[in-house]
Amino acid sequence: MSGAFGPGVSGSCPCGGGPDQLGYAACCGPLHAGERPAGTAGELMRSRYTAFAVGDEAYLVRTWHPRTRPERVVIDPDTRWTGLTVLRTERGGLGDDDGVVEFVARWTEPSAGALRRGELHEMSRFARRGGRWLYVDGEHG
């Protein structure tokens, strides 16, 4: 893993800590370490955002639906994920088999000696398979 987080490292979680504003060790850390699966589509989406922020490509592959998963996931080391706002969640709860999470993820990256800023607005689709939530795909808006 790259970035400021990793196993045993304390600090705030890049995803914002979910509804309870937890630190990384109690929020996305246990999901990344395989200690427990995401309980909802929203929790999986936040943990995947955090995986991008901390450079955990293996977690992204593990949580991607096999039907749509690319052969390889490569995270650009120059991109810094700087914030996440969940706009809405549709289904994706404990009793659901599918769900949609709409979010905006903010980023920065170096560009011609300056810092370029941007955001990714996505409606991500998730499905539960074998009792685990998986990312299926997303539409950028």
Image: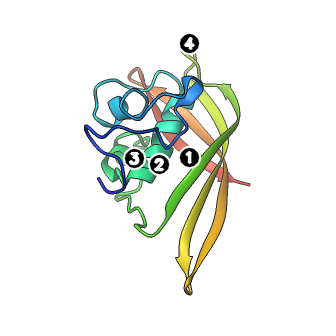
- Quick check: 76 left or right of 91? left
User: Cα distance, mark 1 to mark 4?
Assistant: 21 Å
- Measured from the top left, where is residue 86 in percent x and y? 66, 38
Q: Residues under labels 2 and 3: Cα distance?
A: 12 Å
Q: Nearer the viewer, mark 4 or mark 2?
A: 4
Q: Percent position (x, y) of residue 92?
A: 59, 24
Q: Amino acid at mark 2?
A: Thr
- Indicate the amino acid at tag 3: Leu
Where does the image place residue 63, in percent across and percent down from the top left?
40, 39
The disc label shown at residue 120, or none: none
Disc 3: CA contacts within 10 A as few (<14), some (14-19) or many (>=20): many
Relative to 43, say whether 71 is above or below. below
How much space separates mark 3 and mark 4, taking CA atoms? 24 Å
Callout 4: few (<14), some (14-19), or many (20+) C-alpha neighbours within 10 Å? few
Q: Are marks 3 and 4 in contact (CB under 8 Å)?
A: no
* Number of residues whose C-alpha sits closer than 10 Å to that of mark 2, classed few (under 14), some (14–19) or many (20 or more): few
Disc 1 on helix, strand or loop? strand
Residue sitting nearer the eye, 78 or 94: 78
Q: Which residue type does callout 4 highlight?
A: Gly
Quarter holding residue 93: top right
First reached walking from the N terminus: tag 1 or tag 2:
2
| Residue denoted by label 2 | 68
Determine which residue is flagged by label 4: 95
Calculate the distance from the C-alpha at mark 4 to the C-alpha at mark 2.
23 Å
Mark drawn on residue 60? 3
Q: CA distance from mark 1 to mark 2?
A: 7 Å
SS at circle 2? loop
Q: Residue at x 52, y 24 (%)?
A: 40
Disc 1 residue type (three-letter):
Asp
Say what secondary structure mark 4 lies in.
Answer: loop
